Image: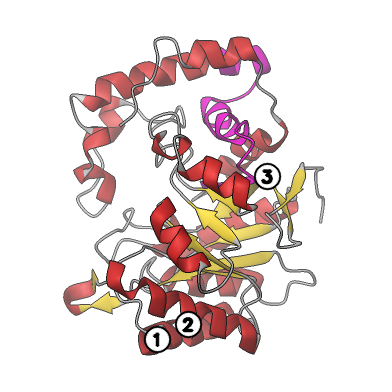
Amino acid sequence: MIRTSLKTVELGATGLEITRVGFGAWAIGGADYDWGWGSQDDQDSIATIHHALELGVNWIDTAAQYGFGHSEQVVGRALAGLERRPYVFTKGGQPEGPGRKTIQSLRRDSLLREVHGSLERLGIDAIDLYQIHWPTPDPEIEEGWTTLAELKEQGLVRHIGVSNFDVGQLRRAQAIAPVETLQPPYSLIDRRVEGEILPFAEREGIGVIVYSPMASGLLSGGMTRDRIEALPANDWRSRNERFREPQLTRNLELVERLKRVAARHDATPGAVAVAWTLRNSAVDGAIAGFRRPDQVDPIVAAANLELDEDDVATLLDPPVRLL
């Protein structure tokens, strides 16, 4: 197995040394649920995971909600028999409800069912990082976080973190047990976490891995109006406001600026978008989703891509409005 030298960093204070770009397994969950990405071939997914590992990526982020276990099953199949497996991060708190719809629960019994299901599907003895997927329902945060602390004490999970929490919710969790990691959305299109959340995480020593650094593919450079119009109904992006007017024109203009910066570095727009998120000193790693092996190389390059002030000025001129 040939591995490239990707830059690594410690994830907060966990002791986990992670590559600056990780494999996001949301899209490989398939289409048969309310947040699907359209049809996906499992063999393509497994080949894509293997290729990312060959390039040196050393962590995978998934969730029980992605296809209600299907993404975890595929990840488990990809990792079976590997001599050296990557770190596996997954999430709970969004179990399957009636009609393949996502429901929200941070109750102890629900989370315990989820974590045992995740362990079985992934085929591992302990999850390297287990995260609360969403802080919903808000009144159940304390019960949910207490449960994760219990799971860590039992050794079923090695580290615990949260996703999509605001500062007030982080403080509530910290009053129970240390929050080791945070997973927020962050991209040139969505910069809301810059104001309070990322500075708080940095001050508190909370490791940060950001998701959707390419805004769910919109900033990859491969999205055109025609392709967006052709998105199938079972791809959640077909219903998302970022892929519709009036936001779409502004977002595609940003892609043109990404292309200009990419040309300076012999890189792709998607790699530039990911590298931009990694410039923030609070950010340890970025999650990039892949569905085919050929998508991996151009984006994983972001781990080693250094943008300068001129690049940033190009990307933010005209300034990207905070949404």
SS class, disc 2? helix
Mark positioned earlier in the residue sequence (1 or 2) = 1
Q: Quadrant of the N terminus?
A: bottom right
Where is mark 2, residue-wise? 147
Viewer-side residue, 122 vs 188? 188
Mark positioned earlier in the residue sequence (3 or 2) = 3
Q: Residue at x 49, y 19 (%)?
A: 258
Where is mark 3, residue-wise? 20
Assess whether residue 273 is covered by the magenta stretch.
yes
| Crowd rating for badge 2 (residues with CA inside 10 Å; few <14, some 14–19, many 20+) | some
Q: Which mark is residue 108?
A: 1
- Residue 318 visible, this orientation: yes
- Residue 137 visible, this orientation: no
Q: Nearer the viewer, mark 3 or mark 2?
A: 2
Q: Quadrant of the C terminus?
A: top left
Specify start and end residues of the magenta stretch as a single range: 260-288
Q: Amino acid at mark 1?
A: Arg
Residue 235 in the figure: left or right of residue 89: left
Spatial CA distance of label 1 from label 2 is 6 Å
The percent position of residue 101, horizontal first and vertical second, equals 22, 70
Is 159 above or below relative to 193?
A: below
Q: How many labels sit on residues?
A: 3
Spatial CA distance of label 3 from label 2 is 29 Å
Is 270 above or below relative to 48?
A: above
Is 139 above or below relative to 261?
A: below
Q: Amino acid at mark 3?
A: Arg
Q: Amino acid at mark 2?
A: Thr
